[in-house]
Amino acid sequence: MTQAASATSGLRFDQPGLGEQLAAMSEQALDGLDFGVIGFDGGTFVTRYNAFESQAAGLTSTRVLGQPLFTVVAPCMNNFMVAQRFEDAHDSGEALDATIDYVLTLRMRPVKVALRLIASPASGTRYVLVRRAT
């Protein structure tokens, strides 16, 4: 994907302040984004999952919503690069907004992606955003 804005929302994967904007978006608006959105709560249970990510990962929202992100949905992210960063941010009470290059490996051939990890002490929802290379 390029840095072009998503068709229906004008939001970009690399846009500053994206966490607050995602929190205010309806599920329908999330589905209009051109990158994957996985929102999860403090217990790591998936609470938001957009259509782009569902189609790209081959997992329906009914299969993903309510499931633990790092042990059931995406155990390939249960490591120091992803899951631990959310835990560290929570423990320190600091915000997290980091983009990392990553390779997804679960249920698919290895896929190079950029992950944006977003968490705020003021929000109950944390986000993993997924931008796949084109």
Image (cartoon, grey):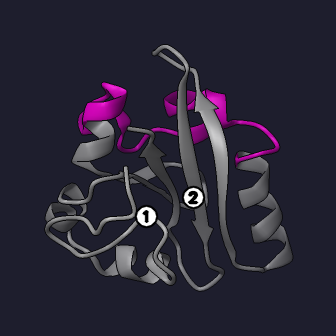
Front-most of 84 and 110?
Answer: 110
Image location (x, y in percent) of residue 7 = 16, 65
Q: Quadrant of residue 5?
A: bottom left
Q: SS of the residue at dot 2?
A: strand
Label 1–label 2 contact, CB within 8 A:
yes
Q: Pointer 1: what residue?
A: 13
From what the image shows, is residue 5 above or below residue 60? below
Q: Residue at x 61, y 70 (%)?
A: 119
Q: Name the residue type under label 2.
A: Arg
Q: Residues within 10 Å of mark 2 (few under 14, many from 20)?
A: many
Q: SS of the residue at dot 1?
A: loop
Disc 1 from disc 2: Cα separation: 8 Å
Q: Pointer 2: what residue?
A: 116
Marked residue nearer the N-terminal end (1 or 2):
1
Q: Which mark is residue 111?
A: none
From what the image shows, is residue 60 above or below residue 19? above
Image location (x, y in percent) of residue 128 = 52, 54
User: Which stretch is magenta?
Assistant: 55-82
Q: Is residue 9 magenta?
A: no
Q: Residue at x 36, y 29 (%)?
A: 57
